[in-house]
Amino acid sequence: MTLGTRGTVLALGTAQTLAWASSFYLPAVLAAPMARDLGLATSSVFGAFSLALAVAGLVAPAAGRIIDRTGGRGPLMLGNGLFALGLVALGAARGPWTSSGAWLLIGVAMGGGLYDAAFAALVRLYGSASRDPITGITLLAGFASTVGWPLTAWMNEAWGWRGACFGWAALHLLLGLPLHLLLPRAAARAPAQVPAPGPAAAAPAAAAPSGWLTLVLLAFVFAATRFVATAMGAHLPGLLMAVGGSLAAAVAAGTLVGPAQVGGRLLEFGLLRRVHPLLSARLATLGHPLGALALLAFGMPAAVPFVLLHGAGNGILTIAKGTLPLAVFGPQGYGMRQGWLSMPSLVLQALAPWLFGLVLMRSVNAALLLSASLCVAAFVALLALRMPARSPAV
């Protein structure tokens, strides 16, 4: 039994929710109990997690190339197995070396099992008509933290942090693996048909002066905006407190990020679905700078507009990460190209909480100017790309 388009989106979106909840969002709840039990500093746990993100960046191009050739069904199922193995190893860890090794294995699974792999799987199935399916899975997986954090906390309370790791591993085998097994098979593609991620791969849908320059510009856009998103995810309550808010007010405003991201994705699925992804991305990069400008000018009274603008922009950019390369280069070689585009993003994402935290400790204004400047630079980079006279169906 295989699924139609809607079923495929539902299956992949649910599997992506599981993958993000059991990896990217895991340390927020388990880092402290894990560190206490293993005799480590909490920062050491987050350091191992940062290393896992770097490993994911190194693995992503190879994972994308495999999906280009074979389709996503098999690689994503393998990803479930690697996630389960890494989580079991993490739950069984007895010290810094074994826990770090487990995080490295989880990093390999992340490199071949998160959004980039899912986007590539959709493009192998639906080609240039993948824009709506990509939006669909991000709408579902946008609730990964909403589902994952409470479930991880419940498992930690009931079974301890080790039991929580084992519980997530079981879900990968009992839920994620069957969901990926239901995905349609894609016809195998010969290696010679997968182009290198350079000028020869560029399609005329939209272009900069050369294919390589386009690739570099997109990599910068995704790295800069992902740095800002990760920095906000780690420091948003502290940032809002630094501009004069109380802890309760900062946390209350911060909870609006999730709904704002989903709202942005719904906007992309509705009003913006008929415009070129390049225009959507340009508009989305301006959300955070406009909010930061309001926060700098008015302080805590502008916290809610800041959070809503940042969250909506970030929600649309998550979709643009999948749809914009498809519109610019076309579907051929999509998976491998996504892997190359992801490498800088994952490295900067790993460093973002630490680097942004250093700036924030010195000056909240400097921190806001840094994040806003990165998004403005991303907007300028996107201006260097041209929209075609007629947008392709993506």
Image: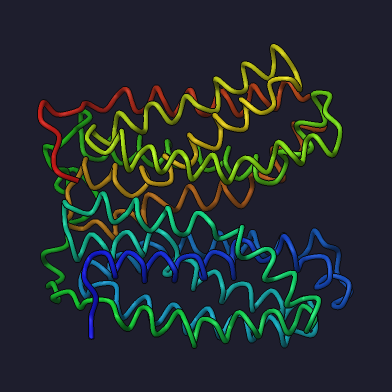
Q: Position of residue 66 (x, y in %)?
A: 28, 72
Q: Is 88 drawn above or below residue 343 in the view shown?
A: below
Residue at figure coordinates x 42%, y 54% from the top left: 138
Q: Is 363 drawn above or below residue 1 in the view shown?
A: above
Q: Quadrant of the N terminus?
A: bottom left
Q: Nearer the viewer, residue 166 or 303?
A: 303
Residue at figure coordinates x 84%, y 39% from the top left: 248
Q: Is 371 drawn above or below residue 230 in the view shown?
A: above
Residue at the top extreme?
297
- Which image quarter: residue 324? top left
In the picture, measured across the screen, residue 328 lies left or right of residue 371, that is left
Q: Nearer the viewer, residue 277 or 197?
A: 277
Whether residue 361 appears in this view of the structure is: yes
- Which image quarter: residue 353? top right
In the picture, measured across the screen, residue 47 lies left or right of residue 217, that is right
Residue at figure coordinates x 29%, y 24% from the top left: 384
Q: Position of residue 103 (x, y in %)?
A: 63, 72
Residue at figure coordinates x 14%, y 76% from the top left: 188
Whether residue 66 appears in this view of the structure is: no
Q: Position of residue 367 (x, y in %)?
A: 70, 27
